[in-house]
Image (spheres, helix red, strand yellow):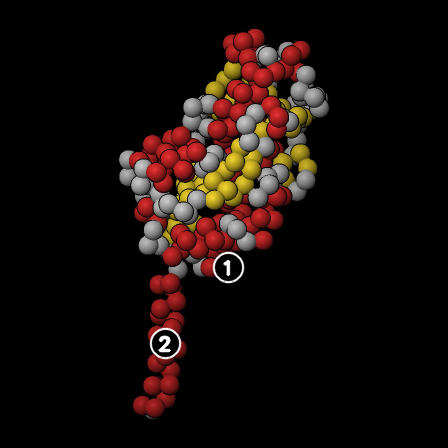
């Protein structure tokens, strides 16, 4: 009996140790990347056993929170400048930054037929409220302002602007009818190559600066293997396929 017990000892130890290998990763995610990141996190947990605990919001607000000691270990921003700045300031690990997606801006309305294929609705009017994300907090909001300025309609439409603190809130304004139309991320209204509902104009990339979205390992995740594995997972073909399905370029 003693020999039998010794034979089972390694198996028992493995069973006990297995749960300890899994870990939670605290992740700050730009609001525009909410839907794809939820799917990526599920695949990551399935493959690695680690759980990505996701918080969604505006890139600018996350920057302030991280600088004030928020417990995030990985940051998926909506731009490339904020992660770079965090690395320069010592709040992120230098050399860990990379572009995980290039975002696309879209003018969208929940109402079919309101937004035309050329975006001429912005010049013609016929709407009372236009939603955007706060340009100082959300890079997509800055891209929206840049687009309106280049089209020469910023001054005329400024009284109609409804500003959300994040892309999530800007999208909510349009989805609930509190704004007739708005500038949102293509990922919020696009999945599997199709527009979910309503009408939309995908803004030409010539009308605003490229929306390069960078990920970075934060200082609090430096010694966390699970955090490093999540960043590595974002570079896999499986994650890239999800990213593409929501209208981004990996």
Q: Residue at x 68, y 37 (%)?
A: 194
In the displayed structure, 6 sits above or below 138; it is: below
In the displayed structure, 98 sits above or below 62; it is: below
The residue pinned by badge 1 equals 47
Secondary structure under tag 2 reads helix
Q: Quadrant of residue 74?
A: top left
Query: Where does residue 1 sit, x and y in percent of width and height?
Result: 34, 91
Q: Nearer the viewer, mark 1 or mark 2?
A: 1
Compared across the picture, whether 223 is left or right of 247 comes to left
The residue pinned by badge 2 equals 12
Residue toward you, 157 or 208: 208
Q: Residue at x 57, y 20 (%)?
A: 147
Secondary structure under tag 1 reads helix
Residue 243 shows in the view: yes
In the displayed structure, 38 sits above or below 32; it is: below
Query: Where does residue 195 sit, x and y in percent of width and height?
Result: 67, 34
Residue toward you, 41 or 64: 64
Q: Dot 2, crowdedness within 10 Å: few (<14), some or many (≥20)?
A: few
Q: Residue at x 66, y 20 (%)?
A: 119
Q: Quadrant of the C terminus?
A: top right
């Amino acid at each position: 009996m003693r020999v039998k017990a010794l034979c089972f000892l390694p198996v028992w130890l493995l069973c006990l140790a297995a749960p300890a290998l899994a870990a939670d990763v605290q992740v700050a995610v730009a609001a525009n990347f909410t839907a794809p990141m939820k799917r990526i996190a599920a695949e990551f947990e399935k493959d690695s056993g680690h759980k990505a605990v996701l918080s969604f919001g505006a890139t600018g607000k996350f920057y302030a929170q991280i600088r004030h000691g928020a417990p995030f270990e990985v940051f998926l921003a909506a731009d490339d400048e904020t992660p770079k700045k965090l690395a320069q300031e010592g709040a992120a690990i230098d050399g860990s930054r990379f572009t995980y997606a290039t975002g696309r801006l879209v003018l969208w309305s929940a109402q079919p037929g309101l937004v035309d294929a050329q975006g001429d609705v912005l010049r013609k009017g016929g709407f009372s409220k236009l939603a955007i994300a706060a340009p100082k907090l959300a890079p997509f909001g800055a891209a929206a302002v840049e687009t309106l300025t280049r089209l020469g309609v910023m001054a005329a439409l400024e009284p109609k602007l409804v500003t959300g603190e994040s892309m999530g809130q800007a999208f909510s304004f349009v989805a609930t009818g509190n704004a007739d139309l708005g500038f949102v991320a293509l990922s919020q209204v696009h999945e599997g190559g199709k527009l979910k509902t309503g009408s939309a104009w995908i803004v030409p990339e010539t009308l605003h600066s490229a929306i390069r979205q960078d990920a970075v390992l934060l200082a609090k995740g430096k010694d966390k293997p699970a955090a490093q594995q999540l960043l590595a997972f974002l570079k896999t073909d499986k994650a890239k396929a999800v990213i593409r399905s929501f209208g981004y370029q990996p």
